[in-house]
Amino acid sequence: MLATIDEETKLRVTRQIAQGGMGSVCEAIQFGADGFEKKVAIKELLPALCQDAQFTGMFIDEAKLVANLVHENIVQIYQLSCVEGQYHIIMEYVHGLSLAQFMNVHVTAQKMLSEEMAVFIASRIARGLAYAHSRLDAAGQPMHIVHRDVCPNNILITTEGLPKLGDFGIAKAATHATAAIEGRSIGKAFYMSPEQAWGKPVDFRSDIYSLGIVLFELLSMKRAREKWTANAIFAASKGWVQWDLLPETVSVNLRKILKCMLDPDPEKRYAKTDILAHDLEYHIYHKGYGPTVVVLEQYLRHICPELYQVSAAT
């Protein structure tokens, strides 16, 4: 067997997809032998972050930790590269839109999302998290993988109706970054668990809390901590949630699930992410047929037809 399959990764960047506080994300074509081509995404970290030794050390460690996460509801990382001190992550390309964009479409149109569809999206992300949270290393020991940044910007929905969670392996390093990114991630505070806002050690239950905030906002199409925007981190540290913003139509059972997800005390939240995923799935399927990726795709075609016009052109 060859020790080295390819001398270098041949890529051609085709366009920039997004620009954020951590860096930029671009669409690219990866080339291989005999005309092989594959569309990928490349996240390029800010130069200031690449010069921060503490950040890069943790970033590399986390990237190695999550490199083998392969699940339909997680954006897969293919490769970590460093060219002249500039770090890049080559990852799965997702054609679709972020959950933040998905929600903005509804807010702009003054349209609410059905309870079943909101829970379906959350249940798929819960399944991805449950998979990551339960990973074991080669010695059979828990890897203690925690995302730390479950929020609408890091959740994508493909044009096939498949929800995916991205940016695994980046958030932990970001929390330890120097002033290079100071002040750029204040929006993340809306989704922090109390223990994360306090700067305490976090485990899988922090991700459950953050997903609870996301689900709350999918149901209400409003910020769960809207009136505390100016003091978002303080509100997060207290575990404050504007429960009065939750529509009265939200069922009693789903309210119970949300209360458990959003308990300020991590000991009172779900003991396993797998149990949460089960409860969410049972909520939408216990009476029989419920939402599927096909149903979500059809819904996307209705509210975001431009996504499919682009898809047809490419």
Image (tube, rainbow, N blue to C red):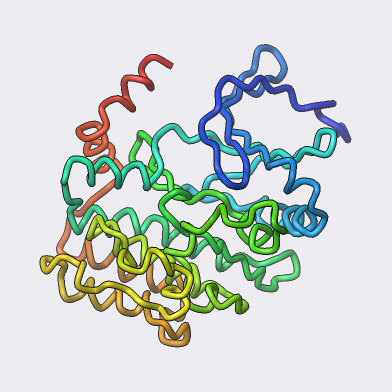
Q: Quadrant of residue 109?
A: top left
Q: Quadrant of residue 82?
A: top right
Residue at 78% over, 38% down: 86
Of all residues, the one furthest to the right in this rendering is 3
Residue at 32% over, 20% down: 309
Counting from the top left corner in percent of width and height, residue 249 is at: 11, 66
Counting from the top left corner in percent of width and height, residue 240 is at: 36, 77
In the shown orientation, is residue 199 left or right of residue 104? Answer: right
* Of 122 and 196, the residue lying toward us: 196
Q: What quarter of the picture does the C terminus occupy?
A: top left
Counting from the top left corner in percent of width and height, residue 176 is at: 70, 63
| Vertical position of residue 194 compared to residue 296: above or below | below
In the shown orientation, is residue 179 left or right of residue 258? Answer: right
Of all residues, the one furthest to the front in this rendering is 230
Residue at 49% over, 75% down: 205
Q: What quarter of the picture does the N terminus occupy?
A: top right
| Vertical position of residue 193 compared to residue 171: above or below | below
In the shown orientation, is residue 128 left or right of residue 241? Answer: right
Q: How many marks?
A: 0
Counting from the top left corner in percent of width and height, residue 268 is at: 41, 86
Residue at 55% over, 37% down: 19
| Vertical position of residue 297 compared to residue 74: above or below | above
Of all residues, the one furthest to the left in this rendering is 249
